Every structure is written in structure tokens, then in C-alpha cells.
Amino acid sequence: MSDSSSSSDLRPDLDELINVQDAHSALKGDPAAGREKTVRENGMEAVSLWLVLISAIVVLAAGAVMGQGGAFFGYDELVKDGYMRRPSPVPQDAPKVPIAALALFQKEGKKVYGACVACHQDSGLGQTGQFPPLAGSEWVVGSTEALSMIIHNGVAGPIEVAGTQYNGNMSAFGANLNAKELAALMTFIRTSWGNDASIVSPSMAANALEISKKRGGSQTSSEELKKSHDKMLPGDILEPDTLLDPETWEPIAADQ
Amino acid sequence: MAEENSTADSKDVLLRSSIDRSLRHPVMFFFASGSLWLVLSIILGLVASAKKHSPEFLTCFSWLDAGKVDAAHMSTMIYGWGSQAAFGIIIWLMARLSRKECTASGVILWAAHVWNAVVSYGVIRIIMGEGSGVTYMEFPSEVWPLLLICYTAITIWSLIQFQVRDAGHVYVSQWYLLAGLLWFPWIAVTAWVFVFLMDGHPLMVAGVAAWFKGTLFSLFFLPVALGSSYYLAPKVTGRPVYSYNIALFGFWSLAVFGPWAGMQKLAGAPVPQFLPYAGAASMILILIPAIAVGYNIIKTVIGNSEAIAESPSLRFTAAGIVLFVVFGALSVFLNTVSALKLTQFSSTGYGFDILGLYGVFSLCAFGSIYFIVPRITRREWLSRRFIKWHFFFSLYGVSSVVICAVAGGLSQGQGIEDLSQPFGTMAERGSQFSWGVTIAWAFILFANLFFCFHLLLMWARLGRRSSHPTLLNTSHPTSPHGAEGEVNNYSSASA
């Protein structure tokens, strides 16, 4: 036992006195370093067989992954097959939602009408004195053949619309339109802004394209339209609430 | 104990004591400031995780945007806590094993202060939205050379001590520490040059950053953790390392496979196809050193369950080593070709990183800290309860973070395989798991608040003045001369 009077100041709250080797007394306040065990020589156990076996299995697993990676140091292979995929545009088994003819034609027609907006405006009112209105225009809600000729071939010279005389020059838009688009556009302008005329079916629009083809490419005039085109287009009649396939625009039965 | 041994031992003890004394200021500074950074990092991790399931959380602070918090969370974890804990362990362990006092602790202490200042500056720049945006290298470009200079000023002395050591024998821990010391500047300089200096293709930058992220763990944090456990396991149990041959095998397999890690993050990106697959293969091969080291350390300490139960250092170290084996096994699973797809844009990688950084490295570092601090402060830990709470909440917390993040990430990965669904649907699949991660970080925060508080008390030299180590699971002695009051504790105590 060491002398408690001489060492009490060094260990004020020790509950027991220490009495170990000289080393300890030399260390005074550092018992932690003193109680350490020496790290002895290493054990020399051999690498066991199962460790080698497990390592071999791991190496095989790693090799399998490497094998998927193509040629090692092959700097030309950039993308692994199967990594670039594209979702199919419509899921194969997704049900088709039928849509009423009028709603479909108005929706599609409004897209086509984007080409007309600059002159005839969103409101369909045109610009006073320059571009005739479509809303309430007898040319729009009247004979569909005349309307199709105007859209398809353009119109030049004096023309009276809704009681006002215009003298403008509308160019031909036919080159960009197929029968479906023409039908949708005509239906859209005939049924918007308070207009309430019949639907133009795709088969009617197809006939319009035929007529226009026979007629030739020049712009029409007010007189020509009144003289030879003032009639309704022949073709299948489409009721506004006929259900159509949204992609093929073919009528489908309601129970499908 | 024989007489001649006694004098040799007393010299030995004096040498140890003087080495501890020479390093006490820098090592304590590293540990204490590191633990403060760790608390900050955990709080940031909590906020970052909360934002994943409740995006409205704390949106009033623009400096806490999800991207900034995520970046600050990982940067403080790595450069605030991890690196500083590693420095403390490296300089102390290298001095002890080379049996040389440190003559440059003033320089190290200065460099440590500069390191902290530079990391603070980097974190502030991240919070201001001026981070680099490169994974694991989020600090702006100018920070990196400063950190590298500090690193040199801190660790060069350990290399010198190793060079001038007396004995020819090099202990296992020294292999790892030396390797880590030399590997770190290699990967850091390479990554810094390719990411910040060269005006390369952004894909190359992403690839180099992924490689840096992989190798920073496998070639720096892992060697330090393994070096420390190869020191503590025999030191605390008093038994030699089970097999020198297996140690060699484990070290060289890590040295061969480690440098390839990282690029698996780019699987599917238009980089040369073999690169991500070489990375994935190397991460699978990490299981080999994991099993070798795990087997060796466990064989060293097994049969000494009392020491594991009682010694905080050994308990943390053993848990860290077991988690290293888990890390290796999980790595095999996550890097198979079919699982690799699921981990690209999900939280799986985060869970895996946390398993490495907290589960493996930090637990081993805590083990070292519980061993080193009583020696350099000459005081014993105050509360076994704090240590136990630290251990159990850490272990449960990190297990929960890893399980939730990995499972949630795999679920997200399966969601992203369904190409007809929008990205948001896939991201939402992880939200319930994010709740688990948030709660688990709260547990880890609780653990580390006690650890930090405990460590700061030790730093203030308020630890117990006693010759008895603070052991877990020992009942209070019924009499002052009971089991704990054994007079000769020279060889019986083990902490």
C-alpha cells in the first residue's frame, strides 16, 4: 500500500489505493497506459480451406457479372443491350374510350384551326373591314361544298359576308390538309361561336378533295362558288352523338 | 510476472504514456470536433430524409432545400466527422505502433483547425447553393487543395514515424494505416484533377466522381477501420491475432479489388460498357476481404465473450466488423446484374453508403475513441449508461436506416422498370420507407448527442480519476474490496 498522505492530492476521488509495479508509481495519474496488454506475436493459423472455397464462389459470382459487361477494355461498346427501351405509345391492353363524333371533331378541328387564327381570330369574328367573320357567316354554315372549296383553294376578289362587303385574298390551305383534318376543321367552324350547322363527315371531306382535284388549283371567287359549288357535299352522314374510335375515327358500337 | 519482464514492462508503459501525452491535444481535438460535425450531419440527414416523405417540411428556409441539405449531410459526414476521426486514429495508432513520440503535435493541431475552418467554409458554400454538385465532392473547387495541404500537414508525421521506427516488424494495423495514408492522396488528387481542373466531358466527370466515392470508402475509411480493429481485438482480449496468413490474404485482396470500386453507379450510362461491370465485380469481390477480416477478428475475440460484453472498445469494434461482413454480403446481392438496374435512381445506394460509413467505419472509430480517450486524457469515461445507449441506439438506428433505404430503394427500382408510369409514381413508392429512415436517424441522433456530450466532458478533463476502466455490464461492487476493487489491476482490467 502506498502512503495515502503523499499521494492523496494526485487521486482525490479514488476509492481504492493502487499498489502495482514501480511502473505504476512512476506513471502517477496514467493508469490506462499501464494496464494495457502487449500485442503479442501473431497467430500463424493457415488459411482454411472453406475460406478459399467461399472466396472461389465469390470470384465466380463476380466473373458472371464481368461476363455481362462485354469485352474488357473494349472502349467502343457503349450501351448494353436491353438498357435502352421505349414505352409503347399505348399500352396494348388498355381499353379504348369511345368519344362522340361532335366532341372528337371539335377537339381535332380546333387544332387544325390554329392555321386560321391569325386572320379569323380565336373569337371567329375576323377583323372589321379586313378579314370576314366565321361566326354567323352564311358561307360557313351554308353549303359545305362551297366552304370546302374556300378552305382548300382559297378565295380572291369581292365577297359579301354577313351583310358586309370584303375584298380580300385568302390563300389556299388545301395542300396541308387530308380528308380527316378537313372534316374536323369544317365541323369545328360550323359548330362554334354560336354556329349550329351539320357535321361534315370524313367521307364528305374526301369527296370535297375529289371535286377540288377535278376543278384545278386556282383560287375561287364569289361568283364561281355561287354558280357551281352552292350545294351540300355528298357522302355518309354522321350523327353528332355517334361514338367513334379516338384513333381510327371509325364508328364503334356503344356496347364495346 | 517475472522480474526482468517487470522492468521491461515499466519502460514500455512509460513510453506508451509519453506517446499518449505528446499527442493528446491534436487527437482530442480531432475526436471532439469530429463528434460535433457528426451531430450536425445527423441533424441534416434527418431533415433531408424528412423532406423525402414530407416535401413541405421546412420549405420556408431556402437554404435548407433538399439538394443542399443532402449535399451538406454527406459532406459533413465524410469531411467533418469521418476524416477527422480517421486522422485521430491514424496519428495515435501509428505513433503507438511505431513506438515514437510525436514531435509535431503543434503543427497537427494547427492543421486540424485549418481543416475545420475549410470544411465549415465549404459547408456554408453548399448551403448558399454554390456547391460543385459532384457526388462526395460537393465543396467548391478551391476547397480541395486546402484540404489536401491540411491532410499532408496532419499525416506526414505518421509516415515519418513509420520510417524511423526501431523494430523491423510491421504489424497488421500498420499495413492498413500506411496503405490508407498513401491511397488517400492518390484518389483525392486524381479525382480533383479530373473533376475540377480538366475541362472534360460531363460523363467522365460523373464516372470519376463515382470512382472517388467508391474508393474513398474502400481505400481510406475501410483500411483505417480495419487497422483499428486489428489493433483493438488482440489488445483488449490479450490474445494474438488468430492468423497472420488470413490477415495477409484479407489485406491484399482489399488492395487488389478496392481500387476498382465505384463505377457500378454508371451501369446503363453511355460509358465504355466494361467500366460499370468491372466496378460491380469488384464490389462483389469485397466480400472476400470482408470474410477474411471478419473471420480473423471474430476468431481472435471469440471465447472471450466477457471482454466483448464489458469493453466498450471491443463491443463497438466487433459490431463494426460484423457489419463489414454484412456489407460484403449485401454488396454481392446489390451488384448482381439484375439488382444493378434497380439501384441506379433509388435510395438503395444511400442505404449502402450509410452502412459503410456509419455501420462499418464509424462503429470501429467509436471503438477506437473509447479506447484512446482515457489514455490521452488520463481520465476514465464517466457513464457506462451513456456508452450503452450510444451503442444500442447506434446499432438499431443504423440497421433501420440501411434496411429502410435499401428495401425502399429496391421498391423504387421496380417502379422505375414500369415504363408506362410517370417518374413521380416510382418516387412515391419510397415515401413510407423514408419515414422509417427519418425515425432511425432520430435514434442515431439521440445516441450521438450522448456520445458528443460525454466526449466533450472528457475533453474538458472532467472524466473520472480512477485506475478502473469504465466497463459495461459490471455490477457495482457490494464492498469496496469486491470484484472491482481488485488491488492488482495491472493485468486483469481490459478496456
Image (tube, grey):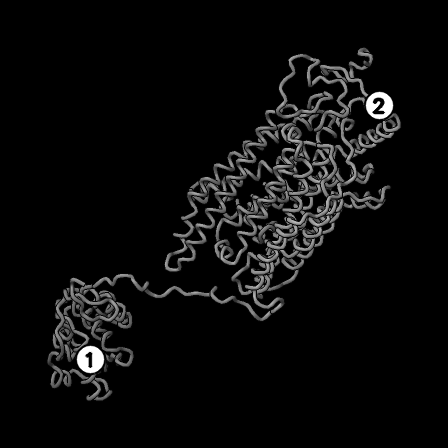
Quadrant (top left, top right, bottom left, bottom right) of the N terminus of chain B: top right
Which residue carries the number 1 mark? Answer: A206
| Left or right: residue A81 compared with residue B477 | left
| Left or right: residue B37 compared with residue B150 | left
The 10 Å Cα crowd at callout 2, few under 14, some 14 to 19, many 20 or more, is few
Furthest-top residue in this view: A5
Compared to residue B338, the image places residue B492 above or below, namely: above
Q: Secondary structure at mark 2?
A: helix
> Where residue A219 sits in the image (x, y, percent)?
23, 85
Which residue does the image show at 28% across and 69% down from the upper left? A114
Q: Secondary structure at mark 1?
A: helix
Quadrant (top left, top right, bottom left, bottom right) of the C terminus of chain B: top right
The 10 Å Cα crowd at callout 1, few under 14, some 14 to 19, many 20 or more, is some
- Mark toward the viewer: 2 or 1: 2
Q: Nearer the viewer, residue B355 or A113?
A: B355
Q: Which mark is residue A63?
A: none
Label 2 resides on the chain identified as A
Q: Are marks 2 and 1 in contact (CB under 8 Å)?
A: no
> Where residue A44 sits in the image (x, y, percent)?
76, 43
Label 1 resides on the chain identified as A
Which residue does the image show at 59% across and 62% down from the upper left? B275
Residues flagged by tags 2 and 1 on a common chain: yes
Q: Identify residue type, mark 2.
A: Ala
Task: Give the mark, 2 or 1, whose residue is nearer the N terminus.
Answer: 2
Compared to residue B177, the image places residue A172 above or below, namely: below
Q: Which mark is residue A26?
A: 2
Which residue does the image show at 81% across and 10% down from the upper left? A5
> Where residue B313 sits in the image (x, y, percent)?
66, 32
> Where residue A215 sits in the image (x, y, percent)?
19, 88
User: Which corner quadrant of the image does residue A69 belong to?
Assistant: bottom right
Q: Identify residue type, mark 1.
A: Ala
Q: Nearer the viewer, residue B31 or A193?
A: B31
